[in-house]
């Protein structure tokens, strides 16, 4: 997601926001993973999703047809839903893949 009023011809790190908490993740030097079409999940949100979906084997239930913000695929529950942006949900598969990417980076 991009900050309101950004210049699409000149995207800056401060323009890229986490789709789940809306913080300027790239600018703050946070670990982040980018999904399809510029979607981003920061390390803090990924940690929350990981704890719920993978470690605790839990997640939100609800209507079966929804789209994961990162992979843009329709998924069945469970998912982790942002407490800030209720329309932002991430599936278990994307949570695992994103965590694997961050785990490989020695800085994070």
Image (tube, rainbow, N blue to C red):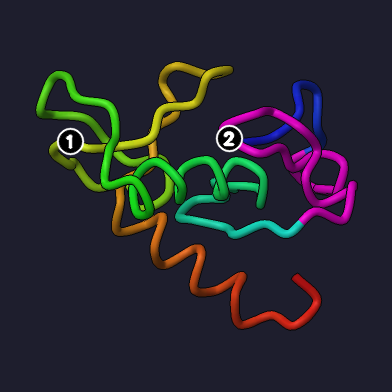
- Point 57% across, 58% down: residue: 34
Q: Quadrant of the N terminus?
A: top right
| Circle 1 SS class | loop
| Circle 2 SS class | loop
Q: Viewer-proximal residue, 66 or 5?
A: 66
In the displayed orientation, state which residue is furthest to the front: 56
Residue 8, relative to residue 62: is it above or below?
below
- Point 13% across, 20% down: residue: 63
Q: Tell me whether circle 1 and circle 2 mark residues in contact (CB < 8 Å).
A: no
The circle drawn on residue 19 is 2
Q: Which residues are magenta?
A: 8-30
Horizontal relation, residue 27 to residue 50: left or right = right
The count of marks equals 2
The picture places residue 66, in percent across and down from the top left corner, at 22, 30
Horizontal relation, residue 23 to residue 43: left or right = right
- Point 29% across, 58% down: residue: 93
Residue named by callout 1:
77
Who comes first in sequence, dot 1 or dot 2? 2
Q: Viewer-proximal residue, 6 or 15?
A: 15
């Amino acid at each position: 997601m991009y900050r309101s009023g950004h210049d699409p011809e000149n995207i800056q790190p401060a323009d890229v926001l986490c789709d789940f908490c809306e913080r300027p993740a790239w600018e703050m030097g946070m670990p982040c993973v980018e999904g399809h079409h510029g979607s981003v999940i920061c390390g803090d949100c990924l940690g929350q999703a990981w704890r719920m979906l993978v470690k605790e084997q839990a997640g939100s239930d609800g209507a079966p047809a929804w789209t994961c913000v990162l992979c843009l695929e329709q998924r069945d529950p469970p998912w982790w839903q942002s407490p800030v942006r209720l329309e932002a949900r991430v599936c278990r598969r994307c949570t695992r893949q994103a965590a694997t990417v961050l785990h490989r980076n020695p800085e994070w």
